[in-house]
Amino acid sequence: MGSEYLLETHSLSKEFRGFVAVNDVSLRVKRGSIHALIGPNGAGKTTVFNLITKFLPPTSGKIFFDGIDITREKPAQTARRGVIRSFQISAVFPHLTVLENVRIGLQRSLGTSFHFWKSEKTLDVLNDRAMELLEAVDLASFAFVTTVELPYGRKRALEIATTLAMDPELMLLDEPTQGMGHEDVGRIVELIRKVSANRTVLMVEHNLSVVATLSDTITVMQRGSILAEGPYIEVSKNPQVLEAYVGTADE
């Protein structure tokens, strides 16, 4: 519909047997922006991700993507629209090569995802595009390395490459720098900046320096609700945010 906002949630809530994990969350993510969702552990950030990507059904509220109500869609339907996520836990195939991992993401374009009887050589047509994606995330030199042998930071870069292989319009990155050393964090920050050039990014992130460096807009959550929203320079001075989040930033 050409709206300024690619993703919107209206009064989104999720209850688990009386426990309210997400409470009346109305979120608007601008097209072409990097939007960060932050807050202390247990604030409801990953649950919001799970609602947006249909891993969980909402108790109430609506989700709109590109102006279309996708609230009751199945996860695969939403993914086909271009809403693609990464996970906190590494989600790669450890005993395939780096190239083969990316090729799996690209395989959907051939329409042979479940044709297990076909020769692996039928996938060779995807190699050039797979290498382009590996170049984009600085992994081309690791293309034929078995993924289990990659350092942790490089595995996270590979996850971004496999996410890009699905041609996302909206990338949802769940804790992309979690557990990384300083050098790897810097590499991933530059990578996210690079791949966001032609798409919209919504990310959950604990590292405040990453959030400050990358984000156009920040939504702060606490106990399932939105506490504050705006650019980092504004949100970081909010007394409620300082009390609720910055004090626990070393978690």
Image: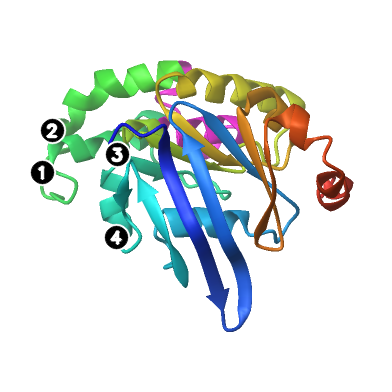
Q: Which mark is residue 45?
A: none
- 102 vs 7, nearest the viewer: 7
Q: Nearer the viewer, mark 4 or mark 2?
A: 4
Query: In the image, what residue occupies the spot 39% across and 43% down?
Result: 84
- First-in-chain label (1 vs 4): 4
The stretch in magenta equals 140-162
Q: Helix, strand or loop at disc 3?
A: helix
Discs 4, 3 touching: Cβ within 8 Å: no
- First-in-chain label (4 vs 3): 4
Question: What amino acid type is highlighted by mark number 2?
Answer: Thr
Which image quadrant: the N terminus? top left
Question: What amino acid type is highlighted by mark number 3?
Answer: Ile
For label 3, count other residues whose C-alpha is less than 10 Å away and answer few (under 14), some (14-19) or many (20+): some
- First-in-chain label (3 vs 1): 3
Query: In the image, what residue occupies the spot 47% across and 73% down?
Result: 59
Picture coordinates of residue 75, whole percent (x, y): 33, 57
Compute the Cα span from label 4 to label 3.
24 Å
Q: Nearer the viewer, mark 2 or mark 3?
A: 3
Residue 209 in view of the camera: no
Compute the Cα span from label 3 to label 1.
14 Å
Discs 3, 1 touching: Cβ within 8 Å: no
For label 4, count other residues whose C-alpha is less than 10 Å away and answer few (under 14), some (14-19) or many (20+): some
Q: Which residue is mark 1?
A: 118
Q: Which mark is residue 104?
A: 3
Discs 1, 2 touching: Cβ within 8 Å: yes
